[in-house]
Image (cartoon, helix red, strand yellow):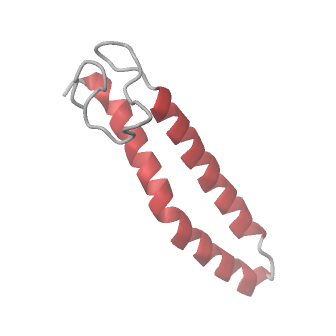
Amino acid sequence: MTDGCKPIRILRTTFLLSLLLCGPLVYGVFLIGFHVKRSFTPGFVLAGLFMVTCLVSFITLAVWPCPQCHRRFVRFNAFWPRRCSHCGQAC
């Protein structure tokens, strides 16, 4: 693996963590925010931040260039590959 693959791994991890942590954290903030302040605003703010993080990492990962062939690393029919769709570079 080359150093050019590190951003791809970071983007994949960010996308996966934002998907997995969104539900439980937003639910907890909704409950705490409602019991403390009688407001859902903190939960909505956190949910918005998670949506923006997930969307930005998804779009960036979808158009990220391969470090070897400089074409798009991911094809849309196979979103979570470990290798480049064009040249086979492993990341």
Q: Position of residue 7 (x, y in %)?
A: 38, 31
- Residue 9, located in which quarter of the rendered image? top left
Q: Is residue 73 left or right of residue 24?
A: left
Q: Residue at x 31, y 26 (%)?
A: 85
Q: Position of residue 34 (x, y in %)?
A: 74, 82
Q: Residue at x 28, y 14 (%)?
A: 68
Depth order, front residue of 65/9: 65
Say above or below: 47 vs 83: below
Q: Residue furthest right?
A: 38
Say above or below: 73 vs 33: above
Q: Residue at x 45, y 62 (%)?
A: 20
Q: Position of residue 72 (x, y in %)?
A: 41, 22
Say above or below: 27 vs 54: below
Q: Is residue 46 left or right of residue 23?
A: right
Q: Is residue 61 left or right of residue 36?
A: left
Q: Is residue 28 left or right of residue 30?
A: left
Q: Position of residue 24 (x, y in %)?
A: 52, 73
Q: Residue at x 66, y 81 (%)?
A: 32
- Residue 40, located in which quarter of the rendered image? bottom right
